[in-house]
């Protein structure tokens, strides 16, 4: 074949793109405006105003709660920027450190992450938890600095029997001259996870709770319209089409779903050489989707955990059941391990995985009492499309070198 026939890039680059800036549809992008979260931003500013008016004399602890995909993370990140900018203007040293506790699974990793935000070259190993707390407080004093620590997806840390929040609050209490150098925002989807916390920590956190409410259909429309305006060229996505995407998004209540559909349907329209996105592109774009939060969860799993998840999916599939028992999942897991030559994990470890799957909203479990079998746990996957979950799990395992 001659070179002219192989100019794929040239051909594609000649086509006018429908995107103005594709990256503005990325779920981690922080937009300049947050329609319908102005009230929450203003509330946060009021709560933290004292950090600027009376530097290092107060410490705030705030808890944010609300369902998945309704702007908790993005609002707090936006607020972090606002706080840093306002304090910089007044020569007050305030740092903002956002840590996702699902990604940094232990108190140790969370603390290292915070310290590395302050000092990029800080080594990862060789310290005890107490050493790290000392390093942090030393750094804050030396630099006359206040830090706002955001513990996002805090529920993942709470069940670990290590009370990082308690230790962090102690830093303020122990501080010389009672300087207040540390504030905390915790983000959780569901307040019930706090029941496992130490009573004093719980009462500290519960003084200021901001409950993020789900967006209405109209609010989702405004948000998606804004995100489409900044990322797509004019007239590519009509209001009618945004309404259609808003309707689908409203059902899941996760704005990520809408952003993803806009991106996918635009790609589909481009590939069909259309001038604008039509309802067929949206329908196609909405197929095959797992929620972004689920994909994110899968990406953080090791191969053992993925294999156990696959075992649950396959057991549900193969036995053609809505619910399976823990034992049925185990049987399938051993078969998978044998096939891919993986050393199986202990039953108690697998039990832990099961609890994590529950927290990650992948599965639901119920304990039932039966006359013959006695009490046992049953597992189901009520909220996700099984074929898509299976395909994604297998893809992740393949990427880790396991041929399934
Ligand atoms: N008001 C808004 N304006 C613009 N974009 C928004 C708004 N609310 C949410 N988004 C976007 O929707 C997506 C989901 O928001 P975010 O990540 O903040 O959800 P969350 O509440 O933290 O969910 P989770 O509990 O799953 O972590 C993000 O990409 C965010 O940029
Ligand atoms: Mg979040």
Image: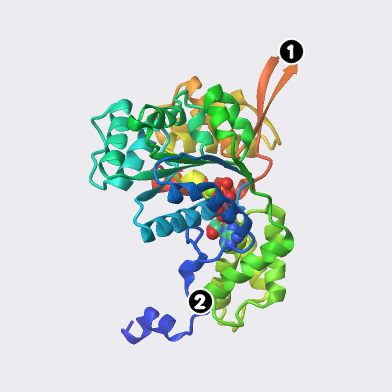
Left or right placement of residue 336 versus residue 324 in this view: left
Q: Is 340 rendered above or below residue 94?
A: above
Q: Residues within 10 Å of mark 1 (few under 14, many from 20)?
A: few
Q: Residues within 10 Å of mark 2 (few under 14, many from 20)?
A: many
Left or right placement of residue 321 versus residue 261 in this view: right
Is the CB–ligand 1 distance for label 2 below 8 Å?
A: no
Residue 316 drawn at (x, y percent): 64, 36
Q: Which mark is residue 143?
A: none
Report the image quarter containing ligand 1.
Answer: bottom right
Distance from Cα at disc 1 to Cα at disc 2:
61 Å
Q: Reading the chain from its start, which is encountered first: label 1 or label 2? A: 2
Residue at which label 2 appears:
19
Residue 206 drawn at (x, y percent): 59, 34
Residue at which label 1 appears:
372
Residue located 39% across and 44% down the image: 147
Q: Quadrant of residue 112?
A: top left
SS for dot 2: loop
Q: Quadrant of residue 372?
A: top right
Q: Is 22 rendered above or below residue 108?
A: below
SS for dot 1: loop
Front residue of 385/128: it is 128
State whether residue 197 appears in this view: yes
């Amino acid at each position: 074949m001659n070179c002219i026939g192989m100019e794929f890039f040239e051909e594609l680059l000649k086509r006018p793109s429908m995107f103005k800036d594709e990256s503005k549809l990325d779920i981690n992008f922080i937009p300049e405006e947050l329609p319908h979260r102005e009230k929450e931003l203003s509330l946060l500013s009021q709560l933290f105003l004292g950090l600027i008016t009376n530097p290092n004399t107060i410490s705030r602890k705030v808890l944010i709660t609300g369902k998945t995909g309704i702007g908790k993370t993005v609002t707090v990140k936006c607020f972090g920027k606002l706080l840093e900018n306002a304090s910089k203007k007044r020569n007050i040293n305030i740092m903002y450190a956002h840590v996702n506790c699902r990604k940094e699974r232990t108190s140790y990793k969370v603390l290292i992450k915070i310290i590395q935000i302050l000092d990029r070259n800080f080594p990862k190993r060789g310290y005890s938890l107490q050493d790290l707390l000392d390093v942090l407080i030393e750094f804050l004093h030396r630099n006359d600095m206040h830090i706002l620590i955001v513990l996002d997806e805090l529920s993942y840390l709470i069940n670990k029997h290590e009370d990082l929040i308690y230790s962090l609050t102690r830093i303020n209490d122990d501080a010389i001259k009672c300087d207040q150098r540390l504030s905390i925002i915790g983000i959780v989807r569901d307040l019930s996870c706090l029941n496992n916390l130490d009573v004093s920590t719980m009462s500290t956190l519960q003084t200021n709770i901001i409950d993020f409410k789900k967006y209405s259909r109209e609010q989702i429309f405004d948000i998606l319209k804004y995100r489409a305006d900044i990322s797509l060229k004019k007239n590519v996505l009509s209001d009618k089409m945004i309404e259609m995407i808003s309707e689908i998004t409203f059902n899941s209540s996760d704005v990520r779903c809408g952003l993803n559909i806009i991106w996918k349907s635009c790609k589909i329209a481009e590939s069909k050489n259309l001038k604008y996105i039509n309802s067929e592109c949206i329908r196609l774009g909405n197929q095959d989707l797992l929620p972004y939060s689920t994909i994110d969860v899968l990406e953080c799993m090791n191969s053992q955990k993925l294999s156990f998840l696959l075992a649950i999916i396959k057991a549900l599939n193969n036995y053609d059941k809505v619910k399976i028992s823990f034992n049925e999942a185990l049987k399938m897991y051993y078969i998978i391990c044998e096939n891919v030559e993986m050393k199986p994990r202990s039953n108690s470890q697998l039990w832990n995985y099961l609890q994590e799957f529950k927290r990650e909203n992948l599965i639901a479990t119920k304990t039932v009492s039966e006359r013959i079998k006695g009490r046992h746990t049953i597992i189901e996957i009520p909220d996700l499309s099984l074929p898509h979950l299976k395909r994604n799990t297998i893809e992740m395992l393949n990427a880790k070198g396991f041929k399934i």
